[in-house]
Amino acid sequence: MSANPTLVTARHFEYITARTTQEDDFLNSLKDHAVAADIPAIWISPAQAGFMQILLMLCRAKEVIEVGTLAGYSAIVMARALPQDGRVRTIEISEKYAGFAEEWVERSDVARRIEIHRGSGREILPTFESDSADAAFLDADKAGYDLYLEESLRIVRRGGLIMVDNAFAFGQLFDENPTDPEAPAVREFNEHMAREKRLKSVIAPFGDGCWVGVKL
Ligand SMILES: C[S@@+](CC[C@H](N)C(=O)[O-])C[C@H]1O[C@@H](n2cnc3c(N)ncnc32)[C@H](O)[C@@H]1O
């Protein structure tokens, strides 16, 4: 680290976003329809999406697992960074969101690369085979992060990638009395990640902060 690191401000985020490959009409339309269907707009940012795609390409990922599909945005983005025979297995607990995501995945250019598993990450991850994925993206149920990390360390191969969203606790990381009920779980998880010897990891300041770890 430089002795005087540059403080990243909202202006830097705007600057980065303006210089990040912009989304196509399909993804914009997916988001508009999701909002119209009362699905919360809590998908990853375009800059984070681009960053995750680059990481997946760099580790030549073919198999990806995800907890938290929502409208299917991140699953589609990740699937686009995989080879033709790649696969994203994504888990969603809400029937409504899973239904919406299925519809939009089916219409997307990567329909064949995405499998939506309906249910809880706690129940479905244990059904995935060990060493059967090159990367994982955890983006749901922060109280479950410790368990999801343990399962990801089992499922992702050595040298693979584990990405975990919301390290900045929805912007409330430093709040004395955070209003978001999941903020304390994120703080505890961050301490866990900082001590985790099985990963080489760092928090990348995209969106709400994204842990990026390589399985050693
Ligand atoms: C932040 S959103 C995911 C956003 C998505 N990854 C994206 O960027 O497009 C979190 C999602 O996780 C789902 N979820 C919450 N608890 C879950 C659980 N225990 N297992 C699986 N999904 C869960 C929620 O219903 C919600 O759709």
Image: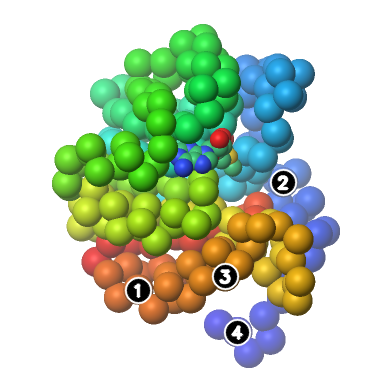
* Type of amino acid at the residue the image marks with label 2: Thr
Task: Mark 2 and mark 3 in contact? Answer it, CB < 8 Å.
Answer: no
Residue 20, quarter of picture:
top right
Name the residue located 31 percent from the left edge and 52 percent from the top edge.
152
Instruction: Tell me, yes or no, whether the two marked residues, 1 and 2, touch with CB atoms within 8 Å.
Output: no
**Rendering coords of residue 212 (x, y %):** 45, 60
Q: State whether residue 10 is above or below residue 188.
A: above
Tell me the mark number nearer the camera, choosing from 4 and 1: 1
Mark 3 to mark 1 CA distance (whole Å): 14 Å
- Quadrant housing residue 34: top right
Q: Helix, strand, or loop for circle 2?
A: helix
Give the residue type at disc 3: Arg
What is the CA distance from the residue labelled 3 to the residue labelled 4? Answer: 26 Å
Dot 3: element? helix
Q: Amino acid at mark 4?
A: Ser
**Label located before the other in sequence (4 or 1):** 4
What is the crowding at mark 2: few (fewer than 14 residues within 10 Å), some, or many (at least 20)?
some
Q: Tell me if the residue at label 2 has its CB under 8 Å from ligand 1.
A: no
- In this rendering, which labeled residue sits more in front, label 2 or label 3? 3
Residue at horizontal 40%, vertical 61%? 146
Locate residue 180, reporting x and y percent: 70, 57
| CA distance separating discs 1 and 2 | 31 Å
Residue on which the image places disc 2: 17
Spatial CA distance of label 2 from label 3 is 27 Å
Q: Is residue 119 visible?
A: yes
Residue on which disc 4 sits: 2
Q: Which residue is mark 3?
A: 187
Q: Amino acid at mark 1?
A: Glu
